[in-house]
């Protein structure tokens, strides 16, 4: 059985960037592919970044009890399929779920052995600058995401580890210490 890790952090903090670097160096870890009703961003591929579903398709999976966890975040639905996680772990992969804080805490309730890691920005101003600098969200979506930050930081108290993504290389090393030792 592989180990289960959950990474959370406010939108724009650099989760995707850090995980890409980490996964390139550690092929024994796999990133779980979630389902979402969010529209794909430019360059995002169905089955690679997410399984992009309609609201109706997503609700059918909820009714069939196929999700390990699901949550509404910033007006869209996101969920992790139970069978997918069970299969990847049984195959011996160390599996990483990148979830919002609600999803992370729900996973911890069901699978207490999961290691929860919260990525923090060096400051709120830097977080906002990164989110804006990514040029992927509308102003309304940016505001919604920034409005979640306070509660996310509050919920991070229940996480096992916190890593500040200040300098990318330094943060990557800290993440490696937490996940590989
Ligand atoms: P998330 O996946 O958490 O929403 P991203 O990985 O998309 O965040 O990063 C948001 C933006 O911040 C991207 O433009 C990325 O290049 C930038 N970024 C990530 N980490 C750092 C860092 N340590 N220093 C400066 N910019 C960063
Ligand atoms: P984004 O729209 O930027 O890709 O993701 C928005 C938020 O949804 C992020 O905090 C991300 O971690 C979270 N997320 C992605 N997939 C899932 C999932 O399967 N379940 C939950 N609960 N959150 C998810």
Image: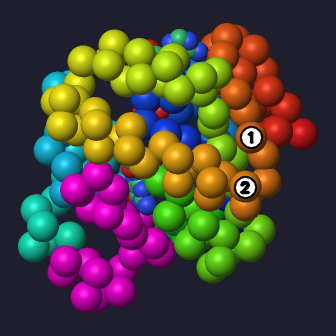
Q: In this view, does 6 lie above or below 104?
A: above
Q: How crowded is mark 2: few (under 14 residues within 10 Å), some or many (20 or more)?
A: few
Q: Position of residue 75 (x, y in %)?
A: 22, 56
Residue located 19% across and 29% down the image: 139
Kindly indicate the quadrant of the structure image that contains residue 89: bottom right
- The residue nearer to you, when weighing 123 against 44, is 123
Residue matched to label 1: 162
Instruction: Classify the position of the C terminus by image quarter.
Output: top right
Q: Position of residue 43 (x, y in %)?
A: 21, 25
The secondary structure type at the circle numbered 1 is: strand
Whichever of labels 2 and 1 marks the residue nearer the N terminus, that label is 2
Residue matched to label 2: 157
Q: Position of residue 47 (x, y in %)?
A: 28, 47
**C-alpha gap between disc 2 and disc 1:** 9 Å
Residue located 55% across and 41% down the image: 9
Q: Over which residues does the magenta segment extend?
A: 59-83
Instruction: Classify the position of the N terminus by image quarter.
Output: bottom right
Q: In this view, does 156 lie above or below 41?
A: below
Residue located 79% across and 54% down the image: 160
| Number of numbered discs | 2
């Amino acid at each position: 059985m592989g180990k289960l890790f959950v990474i959370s952090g406010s939108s724009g903090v650099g989760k995707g960037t850090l995980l890409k670097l980490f996964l390139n160096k550690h092929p024994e870890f796999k990133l779980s592919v979630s389902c979402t009703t969010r529209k794909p961003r430019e360059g995002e591929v169905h089955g690679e970044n997410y399984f992009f579903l309609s609201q109706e398709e997503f609700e059918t999976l909820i009714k069939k009890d196929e999700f390990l966890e699901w949550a509404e975040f910033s007006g869209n639905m996101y969920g992790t399929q139970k069978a997918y996680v069970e299969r990847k772990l049984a195959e011996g992969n160390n599996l990483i779920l990148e979830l919002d804080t609600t999803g992370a805490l729900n996973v911890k309730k069901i699978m207490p052995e999961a290691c929860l890691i919260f990525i923090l920005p060096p400051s709120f101003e830097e977080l906002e600058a990164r989110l804006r600098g990514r040029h992927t969200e509308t102003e309304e979506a940016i505001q919604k995401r920034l409005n979640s930050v306070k509660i996310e930081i509050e919920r991070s108290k229940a996480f096992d580890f916190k890593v500040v993504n200040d300098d990318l290389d330094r943060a990557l090393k800290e993440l490696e210490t937490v996940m590989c030792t």
